[in-house]
Image (cartoon, rainbow, N blue to C red):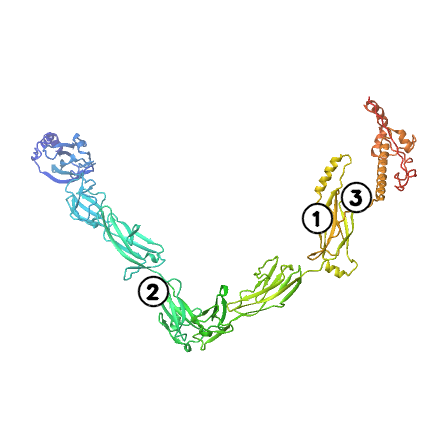
């Protein structure tokens, strides 16, 4: 039946379907038509499914009606032979029929695909054919694109207005807009949610600073924009100054000297502030943090921080006061002072300096080993500082200790000093010393040691005295006002000593004495004058000597020698002279009390005249006349030797030129006269002296003389500084002639020379025996032809073997005379004894031992 239906009415049926989109379908074969309506939302460029029933119809056709029109155009149809996709489907996207169904799958959905889709489906059932109309209204939604944010002012000033707009290129309405605010810390806040793309800030403040993001959404998707920074310009606020380490005082901040102090300035500002630090209105640093590594007391003052906003050209300032605390220098100083005229004690502790002032207090006693100050404070009584503690001598025993404890907030530990009260260990000491030139005399009194110091005062004759002074007292007395032999008393008082102690001085002028008031000495000797100071106080500066001309004697090494000691001064006069050194000498000494002097008489005696000396022998030692032997004797030479040695201490031997002895016999008379005049001019009128410092000498050899010059010689005796009379001058005589040594010497020399010549001659004859065989045979005898040659020399054997071969060659080739090598003499021809003469060299000629003279003449002829 379906087939018939299809065959008879199909053409008319499909033709009538497209007559009108809004008209009812007219079917020849009446029956019920089913209508189905649906709405499908599609997304641009994505896929969508349009359903045409749940069961595959036998026949179907899909049509498309564009919005705003009434025309239906076929997209896909299937008349039983499979689906056929029309050309229109290509404009609607990638249209595909889902397998085993009539539903359409449209991929890459374009925006033009939006409209009404109609699926006409025919189902062949047992009850007959049924018609279905499926109306699918397809809406193509466009996703929202990524939004972007537009700002009216990216850096608004605090208090002004600003707006932001969320820009969007695509997106199907309705679109919702949401604004998000993200702070620097990452905290996100949602401000508005509406369909408006504008976000308005009527009065911005610094809290609005941060990241802003726009979120756009529709039915399809949700997109977020990139962040944009909204920078609110503001400030600077009043700076906040933080001081490290933190320490507040009434006046501001405080710091400890030598610690590191950091000043941090912070002011709310955008852009960040620029900071400038001022110290007492003087710029010292640029930057938020000003650090003083080792702060000192001179850094105390006002510190101001100036914050500047360079963008807004605004500024703000804050000032603080910083006080640098510093401890006093060193440690506390303790002292014990007398009070009430040295009858009581006062404890004083001072530690000047520091800020604030240190805390000081006294304790009795000292710290023991391992004991801290806190424990000591609990064990002893605290005595406040700057309060005079008066206590009698009976309450304080000798060698009592006190301790002053000092603390300061700039110091971690406490410090202390101690004072001990004790009496001086010894007795008062008095002494006197004068000023230069003894114009004043100072009497000094001291009582060293003790704490506190003792009080001393002077008391002298005639009301002289000095008021009380601690530890040391000096009384000044002018020269002339001092009482000789009077006592001056010094009184000393100490708080820990019950009774006053004294010491006295007796002032005495110098008293001089000498061992001998008259001193005699021989001329030329050294003599010593003594001066001793017996009593004086104060000690004289020195003892002064005056010579016989009343002039002060200085320490002159060539004449005077002063030997000083504590209470004596000896004067040595060197090489005393009777004319200049005899007379009165004075020894003088003085101090501030007075002065005195004594006389010492010096008698210088001359030595006796030495005896006269006579030259007994003046002779040259040899004929070369280089040396002269001089001999002399004294008058009364046979007298007492001791007397002679005492009267004679040495001799002066003198010589001088007289004339020259050099003459030439072949010169003219005028030339001789000229040389004579020259000799007279060259005669030395001055005597050349030779000092002999031994009185026992009676002879002397005078050397280094000129042989061609004649001399005069004389002798003079000397007795220390007394010179005697010179002897008569004598000219040296030549020594007597003696020929015996010369003859002996000449004879010995001749014998030695003859012996040497004889030996040389014999050696020559032996070596040249072939050249002069007759001479050789004459002296040594002839040899037997068969006798064996005696070889006396190493070369004789070689010569003997080659004698015959060389004899002819030597005679024919030599240009000179023929020379034959000597042969050794026969043993029988050699003499058993020496040929040297053994007789007396002085023997007369004709003696048996006389040497034989042999003359050998050799004549050479040329070729």
**How packed is label 3: few (under 14 Cα within 10 Å), some, or many (20 or more)?**
few
Q: Which residue is mark 3?
A: 623
Circles 1 and 2 in contact, beta carbons < 8 Å? no
| On screen, residue 650 above or below 372 | above
The residue nearer to you, when weighing 591 against 614, is 614
Q: Residues within 10 Å of mark 2 (few under 14, many from 20)?
A: some
**Residue under the image location 75 percent in, 59 percent down:** 644
Per the rendering, the mark at residue 687 is 1
Tell me whether the residue at label 1 lies in contact with that at label 3, contact meaning CB atoms closer than 8 angstroms: no
Q: Is residue 595 above or below residue 52?
A: below
The answer for how far apart the CA atoms under marks 1 and 3 are is 24 Å
Which residue occupies the foreground of this view, 598 or 137? 598
Circle 1 sits in a helix, a strand or a loop, which is it? loop
Q: Report the mark closest to the observer, 2 or 3.
A: 3
Q: Quadrant of the C terminus?
A: top right
In the rendered image, residue 32, in percent from the top left (x then y), is placed at 8, 38
**Dot 2: element:** loop
Rendered position, 227 above or below 727: above
Q: Which residue is mark 2?
A: 357
Front position in the image: 486 or 754: 486
Residue 850 place in picture, x, y as percent: 90, 38
* Residue 483 at x, y percent in the picture: 49, 72
Q: Quadrant of the N terminus?
A: top left
Local SS, label 3: loop
Drawn side of residue 654 relative to residue 771, left or right: left
Q: Residue furthest top?
A: 863
Q: Nearer the viewer, mark 1 or mark 2?
A: 1
């Amino acid at each position: 039946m379906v087939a018939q239906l299809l065959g008879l009415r199909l053409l008319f049926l499909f033709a009538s379907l497209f007559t009108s989109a809004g008209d009812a379908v007219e079917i020849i074969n009446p029956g019920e038509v089913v209508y189905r309506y649906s709405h499908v939302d599609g997304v641009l460029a994505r896929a969508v499914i349009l359903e045409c029933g749940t069961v595959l119809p036998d026949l179907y056709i899909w049509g498309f009606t564009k919005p705003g029109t009434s025309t239906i155009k076929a997209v896909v149809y299937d008349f039983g032979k499979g689906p056929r996709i029309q050309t229109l489907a290509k404009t609607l996207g990638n249209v595909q029929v889902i397998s085993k169904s009539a539903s359409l799958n449209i991929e890459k959905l374009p925006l033009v695909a939006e409209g009404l889709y109609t699926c006409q489906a025919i189902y062949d059932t047992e009850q007959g054919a049924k018609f279905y109309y499926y109306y699918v209204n397809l809406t193509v939604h466009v996703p929202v694109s990524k939004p972007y944010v537009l700002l009216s002012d990216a850096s608004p000033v605090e208090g002004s207005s600003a707006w932001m707009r969320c820009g969007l290129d695509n997106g199907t309405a309705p679109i919702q807009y949401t604004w998000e605010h993200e702070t620097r810390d990452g905290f996100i806040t949602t401000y508005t949610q509406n369909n408006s793309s504008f976000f308005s800030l009527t009065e911005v403040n610094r809290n609005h600073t941060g990241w802003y993001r726009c979120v756009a959404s529709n039915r399809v998707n949700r997109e977020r924009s990139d962040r944009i920074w909204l920078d609110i310009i503001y400030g600077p606020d009043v700076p906040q100054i933080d001081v490290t380490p933190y320490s507040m005082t009434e006046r501001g901040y405080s710091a400890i000297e030598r610690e590191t102090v950091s000043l941090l300035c912070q002011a709310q500002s955008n852009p960040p502030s620029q900071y400038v630090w001022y110290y007492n209105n003087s710029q010292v640093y640029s930057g938020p943090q000003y650090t003083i590594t080792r702060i000192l007391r001179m850094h105390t003052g006002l510190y101001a921080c100036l914050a500047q906003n360079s963008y807004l050209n605004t500024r703000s300032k804050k000032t603080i006061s910083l006080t640098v605390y510093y401890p006093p220098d060193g440690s506390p100083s303790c002292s014990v002072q007398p009070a009430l005229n040295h009858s009581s004690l006062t404890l004083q502790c001072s530690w000047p300096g520091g800020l604030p002032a240190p805390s000081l207090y006294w304790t009795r006693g000292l710290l023991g080993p391992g004991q801290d100050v806190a424990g000591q404070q609990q064990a002893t009584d605290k005595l406040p500082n700057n309060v005079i503690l008066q206590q009698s001598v009976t309450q304080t025993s000798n060698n009592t200790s006190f301790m002053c404890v000092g603390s300061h907030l700039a110091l971690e530990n406490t410090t202390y000093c101690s004072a001990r009260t004790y009496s001086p260990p010894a007795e008062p000491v008095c002494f006197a010393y004068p000023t230069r030139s003894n114009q004043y005399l100072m009497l000094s009194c001291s009582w060293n040691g003790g704490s506190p110091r003792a009080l001393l005062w002077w008391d002298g004759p005639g009301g002289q005295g000095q008021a009380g002074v601690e530890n040391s007292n000096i009384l000044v007395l002018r020269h002339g006002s001092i009482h000789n032999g009077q006592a001056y008393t010094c009184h000393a008082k100490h708080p820990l000593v019950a009774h006053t102690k004294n010491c006295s001085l007796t002032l005495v002028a110098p008293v001089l004495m000498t061992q001998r008031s008259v001193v005699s000495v021989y001329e030329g000797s050294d003599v010593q004058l003594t001066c001793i100071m017996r009593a004086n106080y104060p000690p004289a500066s020195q003892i002064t000597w005056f010579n016989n001309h009343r002039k002060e004697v200085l320490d002159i090494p060539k004449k005077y020698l002063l030997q000083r000691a504590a209470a004596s001064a000896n004067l040595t006069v060197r090489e005393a002279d009777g004319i200049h050194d005899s007379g009165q000498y004075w020894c003088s000494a003085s101090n501030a009390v007075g002065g005195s002097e004594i006389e010492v008489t010096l008698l210088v005696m001359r030595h006796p005249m030495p005896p006269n000396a006579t030259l007994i022998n003046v002779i040259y030692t040899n004929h070369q006349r280089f040396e002269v032997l001089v001999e002399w004797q004294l008058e009364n030479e046979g007298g007492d030797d001791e007397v002679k040695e005492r009267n004679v201490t040495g001799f002066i031997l003198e010589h001088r030129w007289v004339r020259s002895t050099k003459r030439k016999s072949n010169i003219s008379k005028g030339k001789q006269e000229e040389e004579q005049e020259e000799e007279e001019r060259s005669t030395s009128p001055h005597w050349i002296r030779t000092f002999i410092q031994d009185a026992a000498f009676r002879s002397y050899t005078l050397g280094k003389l000129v042989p061609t010059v004649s001399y005069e010689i004389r002798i003079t005796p000397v007795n220390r500084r007394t010179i005697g009379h010179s002897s008569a001058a004598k000219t040296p005589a030549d020594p007597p002639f003696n020929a015996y040594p010369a003859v002996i010497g000449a004879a010995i020399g001749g014998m030695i020379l003859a012996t040497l010549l004889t030996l040389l001659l014999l050696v020559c004859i032996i070596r040249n025996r072939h050249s002069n065989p007759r001479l050789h045979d004459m002296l040594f005898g002839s040899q037997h032809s068969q006798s064996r040659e005696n070889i006396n020399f190493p070369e004789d054997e070689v010569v003997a073997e080659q004698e015959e071969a060389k004899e002819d060659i030597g005679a024919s080739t030599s240009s000179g005379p023929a020379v034959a090598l000597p042969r050794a003499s026969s043993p029988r021809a050699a003499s058993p004894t020496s040929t040297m003469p053994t007789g007396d060299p002085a023997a007369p000629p004709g003696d048996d031992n006389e040497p034989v003279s042999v003359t050998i003449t050799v004549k050479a002829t040329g070729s």
